[in-house]
Amino acid sequence: MTQNPAPREELPLVLEARGLTRRFGGVLALDRLDLDVARGEIVGLIGPNGSGKTTFFNVITGIYWADAGHVSFDGAEITRATPQAIYHAGVARTFQRSRLSLPLSIFDNIMIGNHKRLNQGLWFNLVRRQAFRAEFEHSFAEAQALVEVFDPPLARRMLEPVAGLPMIDRRRIEICRALISRPQLLLLDEPSAGMTHEETSQLMDDILEVRKRLEGLSIVIVEHEMGVIERITNRCVVLNFGRKIAAGTFAEIAADRMVQEAYLGLK
Amino acid sequence: MALSGNDGRRSLLPGAAAVVLVTVFLIVLLRVENQKAIIALLALGIGAVIAANRLGLLKPVARSFSEREDALGLLAIGATLAIGAVFHEDHFVLLLVCTVVLYTVATLGLSVQFGYAGVLNFAGASFFGIGAYAAAVLNQHTAIPHLLVLLIGGLMAALAGSLLLLPVLRTRGHYAAVVTIAFALLFKTFLEVNDVLGGPQGLQVRGMTILGWSFNENIEIGGIELSFYLNYFAMSMMILVLAFVVVRRLERSWIGLNLDALRLDETAAGCFGLNIVRWKVTAFLLGNFLIGVAGTLHGMVVGFVQPNNYTFADSLVLVSILLLGGIGNPWGVAVATVIVVIVPEKLQVIQEYRFLLYAALVVVVLLFRPEGLLPRPVRRYFSGWQP
Ligand SMILES: Nc1ncnc2c1ncn2[C@@H]1O[C@H](COP(=O)(O)OP(=O)(O)OP(=O)(O)O)[C@@H](O)[C@H]1O
Ligand SMILES: [Mg+2]
């Protein structure tokens, strides 16, 4: 069922994390974690609650600094880079607890993710309104086309505030916000939280659909539903207490005794 | 997408009707002197708005403003000029109208800071005062052209504001607000003990002169004597229109989006490349610049400056205008300024209690209509634009 797990050695690495460690007081949220992501690969990041999955994303995206270890992205060191620089380098993410700007429209929320591709000059924005209009209309069409992949009716409501939308639509918009800038690496933190089984399955199909259009997009996905992980990932990494306890294809890690004890057994 | 002629007229109508009604109401209100009549008028006005709201008449007005803003903006300018024309020889009313116009410019500045960037500034009156004092000093001691003085007054307010940048950027939420309160209190004390700036008595401000045209002389056209305040009124209107256009375009651009994004969720905004410092600084400086320009011209309009005109209480009035009008909606700011400035001037009974009244008004609004009288609609990048 797993979609063509490519022979890894041939693919260049997009993300390379080495010995990542992060403490919160007495808690070791990440413990000397090594994790690689190859170009075009979908990696599942799994582990029980509190095992450090979100912390890994927060460290990669520069929200927290690592206490020790290194991260490089596309060959460049980003261990101490700001979230801004990391986004510009080509990493985009969603948040476990949806973090959309509720009073703003669907379009506005997606454009927040498009920051680096929009002209941010004062003169351009305030004075050159014709040029701004062209960029606006182009971006609108682009955002609308992206939303359409997920849900065509939603794409007709681009100027409505996000506040009134159900959770599934919010999740879709958050993913669109992350994808609109055409990142090389997408970090999805429990994108299906709060959704039904069918909705989750639908969302995953949509994500795979978008990925076809974005050449070489790599994805790291945190997900509790094992069916999803089995279906969409090329490879999985299992964390427990911040430490990598297993890695491999889903079939391999599912057969692993330690994983069964730490995680699958509990579920 | 182009609207058909008929549709266009239909959506313009409610907004145009509202502008005309409000203008007529204001003219009558400004004309009437009898206190009982004024109370009756105000009651009528409030009643009419409540009734219109109940009958669902305000929705089409709001829609019309969002679809045909440019045309309605022109109409509003025309209406304001009509008010100026009606009272062409009435010093008192024209001075009042100038104050309304310039306060609107100042609250537009606050609106950029608080409504968009989320930086609460409790020293608005101080930055207004910096502009006014700049006018007093520069007009007295230098030969700098007065249009340039307006610019310098704005820049000085922005510069003084940059003293507060570090705390504003470093701290989140309430601490930054406390720093601006401290600034407002210090500013007034500084003026009072500063002899060069006239101490508690303040300074005279020389009137505006542009290319030999003195603003402080009455105008005579074909035997009709016009109040000299009409000069200032015209100037104030020009500044208001400019400020309005700038603030409007700012909101309807990626920059407005950036400011909203950082106000609503700094962390998420940072994860999408937004430079928090750059945009907060831009909003804070631009806001103070607008407040400063308004203050500079206001100083020249009233002809004198003194510390008591730029107190913390006055800053609170500016903030209450913002809350009352609808945070982040420039039309709301304009309407609220009209209410807050004109009503106490006309209604002498409440003059003494006006701060109490403002406070009560703000509490009532926050309780029953937390988004203000005219809540800010979802961003439209171009009025009337449809996908
Ligand atoms: N900002 C923080 N301050 C203090 N402790 C934190 C912080 N963020 C994470 N932690 C701690 O680090 C550990 C790892 O948390 P993390 O959120 O990364 O786990 P997770 O694998 O994402 O869990 P979940 O499946 O519940 O989302 C937990 O013990 C958590 O309490
Ligand atoms: Mg988590």
Image (tube, coloured by chain):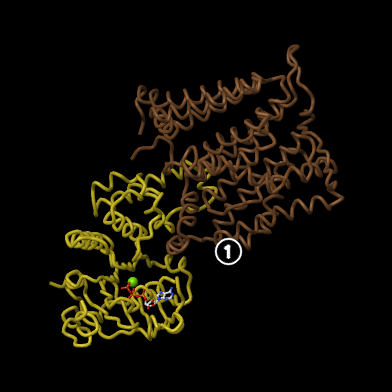
Estimate the x, y position of residue B1 in percent, counting from the top left: 35, 34
Name the residue that disc number 1 marks: B171
In the rendered image, what is the letter of the chain coloured yellow? A
What colour denotes chain B? brown
**Residue B193 position (above or below residue B201):** below
Quarter of the image that includes the N terminus of chain A: bottom left
Ligand 1 within 8 Å of disc 1? The answer is no
**Residue B248 position (above or below residue A38):** above
Estimate the x, y position of residue B35 in percent, counting from the top left: 65, 23
Residue reaching furthest to the bottom: A257
Q: Taking the image as drawn, is residue B82 in sight?
A: no
Residue for point 28% across, 47% down = A155
Quarter of the image that includes the C terminus of chain A: bottom left
**Residue B165 position (above or below residue B218):** below
Residue reaching furthest to the left: A1
Estimate the x, y position of residue A107 in percent, counting from the top left: 36, 49
- Is residue B59 left or right of B235 when viewed as pictured? left
Say which amino acid is labelled 1. Thr
Kind of element beneath mark 1: loop
* Viewer-side residue, A175 vs A15: A175
Estimate the x, y position of residue A20 in percent, counting from the top left: 40, 82
* Viewer-side residue, B125 vs B285: B125
Residue for point 63% across, 31% down = B342
* Viewer-side residue, A35 vs B65: B65
**Residue B298 position (above or below residue B29):** below
Residue for point 61% across, 36% down = B340
